[in-house]
Amino acid sequence: TAPTLEVASLNVHFGRGRARKQIIDDVGFEIRPGESVGLIGETGSGKSTIARSILGLVDPSAGSSVLVAGKQVVGLSANARRSFRRSGVAQYVFQDPHKSLDQDFTVEQSIAEPLLIRGDIKRADVAEAVRRQVDDVQLDAALLGRFPAELSGGQRQRVAIARALITKPRLLILDEPVSALDSANRVKILELLGRLRSSEVAMLFISHDLGSVAGITDRTLVLYRGRVVEVNKTSQIVNAPEHPYTRLLVGSAPTLSGGSIDRERREQLRAELHPS
Ligand code: ADP
């Protein structure tokens, strides 16, 4: 089977002139249908920029290629970009459901919106599709009339996941989907995401935290300063990391930012990585 996502020679620069900075440096990887791939790295390493490049929300540099279900999404016109987004082929869930959910929409409206935007389904069938999707994410149908502000963090994230899945995307990007949740909800949402894996959908699961991706990904890419420094089976990354930076990550699990690794060791590894 052909890969659902093919990223090749992805380079992203931000800023102009002397302020121009390379954020993503020659990143390439593939995800096949049914595969779940982790993308880990600390805050600022470029994870979200990769996700946004795949969704057509960032302009990668010339020569970059991102194929989603065979379609090139780099360098699209504004119109083509809109129609790619409307198609719902690639969907996403972000860390903060406040950003992916419109505060003025009820749960039902939020979940229905991507279908209504795509516009290829009879209005009468939308309500039924929403109900099925709500069931899939184990959300109480009694919440359909509520607004995001009236939901718990875990419920909001279930709404965001239902909304992402309702167009039956080929590619689902999860960018820190559990980072904003308390630990009980974190476990529940990770379980849900594990259950939602299917042989059709390719998943890209982004986190600063290896612990979050470990249980639900097949392979993991390790990103360091915009570069992929290691790609391996997730079990290998967890148990026998090869790159010094990955060893740092694994040593500092479960959290990287302000993680448990002591400062001296961190500095030492940094020196190893960047001999000056
Ligand atoms: P991560 O998701 O791993 O935390 P990001 O992709 O958000 O990392 O950011 C990577 C780097 O790119 C950071 O240094 C960030 O400050 C910078 N960056 C992100 N978006 C922009 C932008 N629109 N303009 C300039 N710099 C940006």
Image: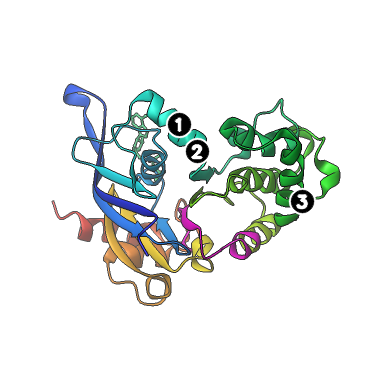
Q: From this view, report whether residue 218 is shown above or below residue 63.
A: below
Q: Position of residue 33 (x, y in %)?
A: 44, 61
| Crowdedness near tag 3: few (<14), some (14–19) or many (≥20) residues, C-alpha within 10 Å | some
Task: Give the CA separation, mark 1 to mark 3.
Answer: 30 Å
**Numbered circles on residues, count:** 3
Taking 216 as reference, is 41 left or right? left
Q: Name the residue nearer the viewer: 118 or 75.
A: 118
Q: Which residue is denoted by mark 2 in the rendering?
A: 87
| Crowdedness near tag 2: few (<14), some (14–19) or many (≥20) residues, C-alpha within 10 Å | some
Q: Position of residue 161 (x, y in %)?
A: 62, 48
Q: Which residue is denoted by mark 1 in the rendering?
A: 83
Q: Which residues are magenta?
A: 192-210
Q: Name the residue nearer the viewer: 178 or 133.
A: 133
Task: Give the CA separation, mark 3 to mark 2.
Answer: 25 Å
- Residue at position x 53%, y 69% in the image: 215
Secondary structure under badge 3? Answer: loop
Identify the disc placed on residue 139. Answer: 3
